Image (cartoon, grey):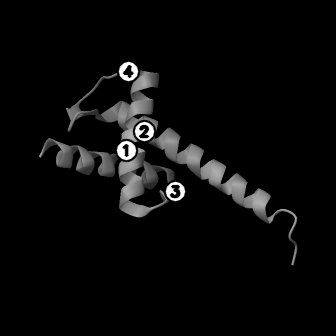
Amino acid sequence: MEILWMLIVGGIIGWLAGLLTGRDVPEGIIGNIIAGFVGSWLGGLILGSWGPVIGGFAIMPAIIGSIILVLSVSFLLRNMGQKKNHGHHV
């Protein structure tokens, strides 16, 4: 049951990061869960563990880390798309 709770909280954190940044997280629910988990790890590395903890996640660092992750992935995907389409004018 604890794993299910972690997946739900991770998904909500990833969804919130996408909502706050105005960017869609690729791959829908699975992408939100991954963004929540990786973002919380990143936030913990950068900011430590403080604030309320829900489902094993320190919520504030997790959300901030997820926002950084979503913005970074969005930036990389946009740049890769521009490079792919760069030499092909119609």
Q: Earlier in the sequence, mark 2 or mark 4?
A: 2
Q: Position of residue 41 (x, y in %)?
A: 40, 32
Q: Can you tell which quarter of the image residue 49 is in?
A: top left
Tags 1 and 3 touching, CB below 8 Å:
no
Residue at screen point 42% across, 39% down: 38
| 69 versus 90 height, above or below | above
Question: Looking at the image, is mark 1 or mark 3 nearer the viewer?
Answer: 1
Question: Looking at the image, is mark 3 or mark 2 nearer the viewer?
Answer: 2
| Alpha carbon distance from label 2 to label 4 | 12 Å
Q: Which mark is residue 36?
A: 1
| Alpha carbon distance from label 4 to label 1 | 16 Å
Of helix, strand and loop, which one carries label 1? helix
- Identity of the amino acid at label 4? Gly
Q: Give left or right: position of 28 versus 78.
A: left
Q: Position of residue 18 (x, y in %)?
A: 45, 53
| Alpha carbon distance from label 4 to label 3 | 25 Å
- Identity of the amino acid at label 3? Arg
Can you identify the residue that label 4 sits on? 48
Of helix, strand and loop, which one carries label 2? helix
Q: Quadrant of the C terminus?
A: bottom right
Residue at screen point 46% across, 23% down: 46
Residue at screen point 41% across, 62% down: 28
Can you identify the residue that label 3 sits on? 23
Can you identify the residue that label 2 sits on? 39
Q: Give left or right: position of 26 versus 12.
A: right
Q: Earlier in the sequence, mark 4 or mark 1?
A: 1
- Identity of the amino acid at label 2? Gly
Tags 1 and 2 touching, CB below 8 Å:
yes
Q: How many C-alpha atoms fall within 10 Å of the one at disc 4: few (<14), some, or many (≥20)?
A: some
Outermost residue, left side: 1
Q: Earlier in the sequence, mark 4 or mark 3?
A: 3
